[in-house]
């Protein structure tokens, strides 16, 4: 494996829900290499979103450590640490402030982190929009004036503005139609190659995983049940839970239909 960009070492997180203690993530260890895309998959309640929030620093872990480039990240992240990990959320409409123009939303990241000279930031906004396939003049538009795919491109541009090498993608295509999904996935793949980005990709959609991830980690009830290269996970899943997820996923090709039929027989 290449040099490790981010690593989780025996990370756990619990929450109080009324009188109950819920263990959302239990003793998770995983490494993500520089330039790699690790997909984290599982059903609702599996712990994948909690794990994403631990990486982002939204929650501190109850136990274990999170390291970036070999250095432990503190439970309470500084502004510098927050800049190092960026997020692209599921719903681009709710993630963008409707009262700000596209340019103002992107500029906020530049202003907060002091990136570039103030007089150069308008030009930088245009460059970022161009990088995600949008004209520079879109900087004057409001999010409501854009399509869902265009809004997600703006959200990606905002994440790129911070010049982080690590991006957490939380169901970034689930609110988009299939054609737009494919375009956004292609854009994310192109940006990863061009910028040397590392992705932690949170999703329940295994069809999406096949088109972007190098490796897949499967979570169930907060625990890791399987991890491996994407091709191996889909062709030779080892855990019954993984086989069930694949068997229930949408099929778009004959070989996938044959695999799903085989897995359904295996799990009874």
Image (tube, helix red, strand yellow):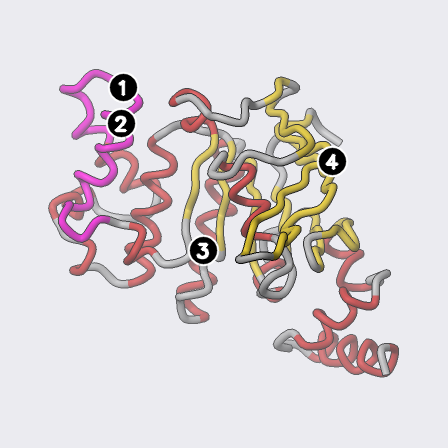
Numbered label attached to residue 8: none
Viewer-side residue, 174 vs 43: 43
Q: Secondary structure at mark 2?
A: helix
Mark 2 closeness class: few <14, some 14–19, many ≥20 residues within 10 Å: many
Q: Secondary structure at mark 3?
A: loop
Q: Are marks 1 and 2 in contact (CB under 8 Å)?
A: yes
List x then y, in percent, for residue 57. Answer: 49, 34
Q: Is residue 47 magenta?
A: no
Q: Quadrant location of the N terminus?
A: top right
Q: Secondary structure at mark 4?
A: strand
Viewer-side residue, 96 vs 161: 96
Distance from disc 3 to disc 4, alpha carbons, whole Å, reads 27 Å
Distance from disc 1 to disc 2, alpha carbons, whole Å, reads 6 Å
User: Label 2: which residue?
Assistant: 110
Tag 4 or tag 1, which sits nearer the N-term?
Answer: 4
User: Label 3: which residue?
Assistant: 172
Q: Is residue 99 magenta?
A: yes
List x then y, in percent, for residue 215. Answer: 70, 48
Numbered label attached to residue 10: 4
Distance from disc 1 to disc 4, alpha carbons, whole Å, reads 35 Å
Report whether 216 appears left or right of 183.
right
Numbered label attached to residue 114: 1
Residue range corresponding to the magenta coloring? 97-124
Q: Are marks 3 and 2 in contact (CB under 8 Å)?
A: no
Magenta segment, principal secondary structure?
A: helix
């Amino acid at each position: 494996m290449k040099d490790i960009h981010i690593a989780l070492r025996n990370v756990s997180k619990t929450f109080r829900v009324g009188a109950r203690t819920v263990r959302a993530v239990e003793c998770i260890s995983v490494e993500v290499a520089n330039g790699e895309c690790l997909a984290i998959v599982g059903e609702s309640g599996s712990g994948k979103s909690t794990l994403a929030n631990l990486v982002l620093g939204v929650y501190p872990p109850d136990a274990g450590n999170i390291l970036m480039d070999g250095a432990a990240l503190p439970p309470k992240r500084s502004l510098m640490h927050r800049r190092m990990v960026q997020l692209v959320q599921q719903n681009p409409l709710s993630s963008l402030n409707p009262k700000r123009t596209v340019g103002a939303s992107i500029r906020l990241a530049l202003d907060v982190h002091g990136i570039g000279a103030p007089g150069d930031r308008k030009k930088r906004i245009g460059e970022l929009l161009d990088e995600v396939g949008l004209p520079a003049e879109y900087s004057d538009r409001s999010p409501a004036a854009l399509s869902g795919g265009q809004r997600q491109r703006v959200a990606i541009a905002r994440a790129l503005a911070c010049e982080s090498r690590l991006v957490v993608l939380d169901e970034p295509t689930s609110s988009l139609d299939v054609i737009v999904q494919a375009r956004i996935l292609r854009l994310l793949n192109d940006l990863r190659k061009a910028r040397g980005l590392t992705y932690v990709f949170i999703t329940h959609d295994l069809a999406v995983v096949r088109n972007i991830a190098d490796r897949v980690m499967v979570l169930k009830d907060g625990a890791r049940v399987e991890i491996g290269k994407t091709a191996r996970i889909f062709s030779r899943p080892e855990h019954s839970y993984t086989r069930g997820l694949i068997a229930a996923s949408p099929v778009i090709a004959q070989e996938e239909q044959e695999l799903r039929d085989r897995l359904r027989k295996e799990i009874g």
